[in-house]
Image (cartoon, rainbow, N blue to C red):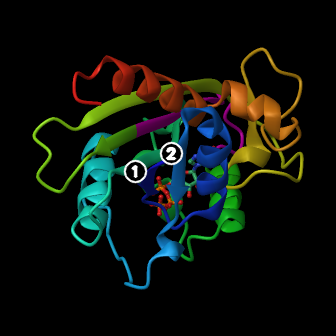
Amino acid sequence: MKEIVIATNNNHKFSEIVSITQDWGVNCLSLNDFTCSFSYDEPYFSFMENALHKAREVSKLVSLPVLADDSGICVDALNGKPGVFSSRYSEDGTDESNRRKLLSALHGISNRQATFICVMVLIRSYSDLCPLVSYGFWSGCITLEEVGETGFGYDRIFLPLGCKQTAAEMPPSSKRDLSHRAQAIRKMREEILRCPWG
Ligand code: ITT
């Protein structure tokens, strides 16, 4: 079975990616499967550049294809913030304080529209001349308070368009169908199948 390294330190993301790629016929390895330690920053202002950077940093140390995702939530009334800074929005950067900061930034604001964005990059080697890239968007709005207990990040305060449950209330199987990450993964699958040397 082919192996692929998922370049993330976020266990929730890793589990979502593994469950959505189950039928790909690949074995997803996590960074914990390696003895070396990986470190990467996210220095850029676009999800695409950050995702490629993460994939390359991990690829320096492993000789396997690497899949990375950079994602975040973009809030209309905040001109797209927190965006690429979603995981570092509050001072201590925990999910709980990030959510609290976002709820207080939107206090008294009626336009609560927001979009989760995920950009996924697959490289076959560090010097891959043609990284595969895919995108996913999940629109909705920010709730007035936290609702639900599953998921991670901003799930408890994100009500997807057309849904009656927040991303943290819906069954994980629904998030796996609908989310920005699920969409990006499905599109990545199409890219891989289209790619002549895939
Ligand atoms: P890696 O860089 O190691 O992959 P990370 O959590 O720092 O882990 P990102 O830099 O891509 O990943 O930041 C994504 C942040 O955006 C994440 O920490 C959440 O706060 C938020 N986010 C992204 N996808 C989400 C989702 O499906 N549900 C809830 N919040 C999400």
Q: Residue 165 at x, y = what percent?
A: 88, 30
Category of crowding for the residue at label 1, using alpha-carbon neighbours closer than 10 angstroms: few (below 14), some (14–19), many (at least 20): many
Relative to 94, say whether 169 is above or below: above
Pointer 1 residue Cβ closer than 8 Å to ligand 1: yes
| Amino acid carrying mark 2 in the image | Gly
Relative to 189, say whether 53 is above or below: below
Which of discs 1 and 2 lies nearer the camera? The answer is 1
Label at residue 18: none
Query: Is 139 left or right of 86, judged from the image as shown?
Result: right
Do we see residue 115 in this rendering?
Answer: no
Label at residue 68: 1
Category of crowding for the residue at label 2, using alpha-carbon neighbours closer than 10 angstroms: few (below 14), some (14–19), many (at least 20): many
Q: Which residue is mark 2?
A: 72
Quadrant containing the C terminus is top left
Q: Residue 16 at x, y = what percent?
A: 65, 46
**Picture quadrant where residue 62 is located:** bottom left
User: Helix or strand or loop: what does disc 1 sit on?
Assistant: strand
> Which residue lies at the image location 10% right of the left edge and 40% below the top edge?
129
Pointer 2 residue Cβ closer than 8 Å to ligand 1: yes
> Which residue lies at the image location 88% right of the left edge and 53% below the top edge?
149
Query: Is 81 left or right of 63, judged from the image as shown?
Result: right
> Which residue lies at the image location 56% right of the left edge and 70% below the top edge?
93
The part of the chain drawn in magenta is 106-119
| Amino acid carrying mark 1 in the image | Ala
Q: Residue 58 at x, y = what percent?
A: 31, 66
Q: Are marks 1 and 2 in contact (CB under 8 Å)?
A: no
Q: Report how far apart the C-alphas of labels 1 and 2 lie in the structure.
A: 14 Å
Relative to 152, say whether 94 is above or below: below
